[in-house]
Image (tube, rainbow, N blue to C red):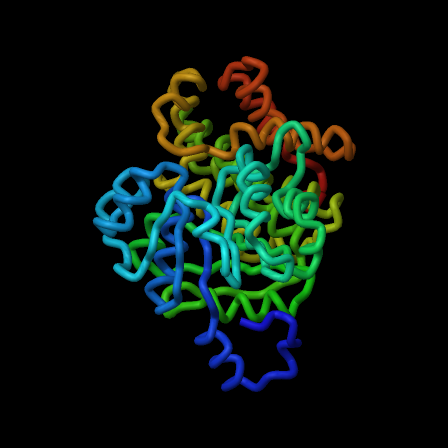
């Protein structure tokens, strides 16, 4: 697929043909979301290779067409190839999609970059911040592959629960790239009858929305675990959206981004679904369990746990008031009791709600 040609210069038929001619797509990371996204692309008839860190998992996916570790019971496309050889996965790919958790993202990207052409778009599916740098994944990509920034650095974000997408339920997301032409072309490439994509140029907004909503989801889960009622959950979600917007605008995001799929859509989904790992962490905390015990029982990463520390630091540096995020941070990292969160939740109610 030629990402060097402006989208406006091509007619609808030519754009359609360009999508059909897309080369191999590499999806790096075989967790639930990476697998579900790779499967969705493969079901479109695209040539997709999924990279799994463990050889036995790659073999199982390739041979049985199921990722029983992370998407049990879901039959994957027989066209989907899986490998534990990163070079094999990314070499010759026209698009590289990164689905590796934030704390291992840089290491895997650095290795993958050795076999990736600088002109290839790098798409992040990850909703987390790197510690201890507090970098967003787009910033990590720009640091490791300078030639990619900004025209080839892409973020996909939205209310995207992996199990539902793998099951074929209708869903949507935004594709964000500073070069809107590249975002438009990838929007067409990723779209399917059950997965609607929209293109935007606000990379920072798409990423910050995806990070902060995980922290707010933990707070919502705590409120539910404490049986504080639906009014309280609505308070946490709504004021959490305000915190997301305040932090995002500080880092150059468009406030309107948070009124869409990468903001309000994602926060509603993650804060209310039983499929959300971050909500589940908060729910168990609210029921009285300890964070170490909760995380030990989980197969996959709940990005909000470490993201809460990064959001705390970013807010302190920027002088932004984030009461709910701060309350979640203190529970997770400073040993504060979940019962002490009530006063913090009420502190979010301001004289002017739009603040």
| 212 left or right, relative to 50 | right
Camera-side residue of 92 and 298: 92
One can see residue 242 in this view = no
Q: Position of residue 93 (x, y in %)?
A: 50, 60
Camera-side residue of 324 and 80: 80
Q: How far across and down, in percent of the image, does residue 241 sit?
A: 59, 44
Which residue does the image show at 60% across and 83% down from the upper left? 10
Counting every numbered tag in the picture gives 0
- Taking 282 as reference, is 152 left or right? right
Residue occupying image coordinates x 36% and y 68%: 44
Question: Foreground residue, 204 or 209?
Answer: 204
Q: Relative to 349, say whether 191 is above or below.
A: below
Q: Residue at x 53, y 34 (%)?
A: 104
Quadrant in the rendering for residue 103: top right
Q: Is residue 89 visible?
A: yes
**Image quarter of residue 314:** top right
Residue 7 x %, y %? 62, 77
Q: Based on the displayed image, in which of its 4 quarters is residue 211 positioned?
A: top right
Q: Position of residue 11 (x, y in %)?
A: 57, 86
Q: Is residue 257 left or right of residue 320?
A: left
Position above or below: 194 against 72: below
Quadrant in which the C terminus appears: top right
Q: Is residue 304 left or right of residue 130?
A: left
Q: Residue at x 40, y 28 (%)?
A: 283
């Amino acid at each position: 697929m030629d990402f060097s040609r402006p989208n406006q210069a091509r007619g609808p038929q030519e754009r359609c043909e360009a999508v059909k001619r897309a080369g191999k797509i590499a999806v790096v990371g075989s967790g639930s979301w990476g697998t579900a996204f790779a499967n969705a692309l493969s079901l479109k008839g695209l040539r997709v290779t999924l990279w799994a860190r463990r050889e036995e998992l790659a073999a199982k996916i390739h041979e049985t067409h199921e990722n029983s570790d992370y998407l049990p019971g879901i039959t994957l496309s027989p066209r989907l190839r899986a490998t534990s050889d990163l070079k094999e996965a990314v070499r010759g790919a026209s698009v590289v999609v990164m689905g590796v958790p934030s704390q291992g993202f840089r290491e895997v990207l650095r290795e993958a970059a050795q076999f990736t052409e600088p002109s290839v778009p790098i798409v992040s599916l990850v909703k987390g911040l790197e510690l201890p740098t507090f970098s967003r994944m787009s910033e990590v990509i720009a640091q490791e592959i300078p030639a990619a920034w900004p025209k080839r650095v892409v973020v996909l974000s939205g209310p995207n629960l992996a199990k539902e997408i793998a099951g074929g339920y209708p869903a949507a997301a935004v594709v964000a790239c500073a070069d809107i032409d590249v975002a438009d072309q990838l929007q067409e490439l990723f779209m399917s009858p059950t997965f609607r994509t929209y293109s935007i140029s606000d990379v920072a907004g798409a990423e910050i929305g995806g990070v902060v909503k995980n922290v707010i989801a933990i707070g919502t889960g705590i409120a539910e675990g404490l049986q504080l009622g639906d009014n309280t959950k609505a308070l946490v979600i709504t004021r959490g959206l305000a915190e997301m917007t305040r932090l995002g605008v500080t880092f150059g995001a468009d406030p309107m981004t948070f009124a869409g799929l990468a903001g309000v859509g994602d926060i509603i989904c993650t804060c209310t679904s039983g499929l959300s790992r971050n909500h589940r962490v908060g729910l168990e905390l609210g029921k009285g369990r300890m964070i170490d015990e909760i995380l030990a029982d989980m197969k996959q990463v709940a990005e909000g746990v470490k993201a809460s520390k990064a959001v705390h630091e970013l807010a302190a540096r920027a002088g932004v008031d984030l009461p709910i995020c701060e309350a979640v941070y203190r529970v997770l990292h400073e040993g504060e009791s979940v019962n002490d969160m009530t006063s913090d939740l009420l502190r979010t109610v301001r004289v002017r709600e739009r603040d």
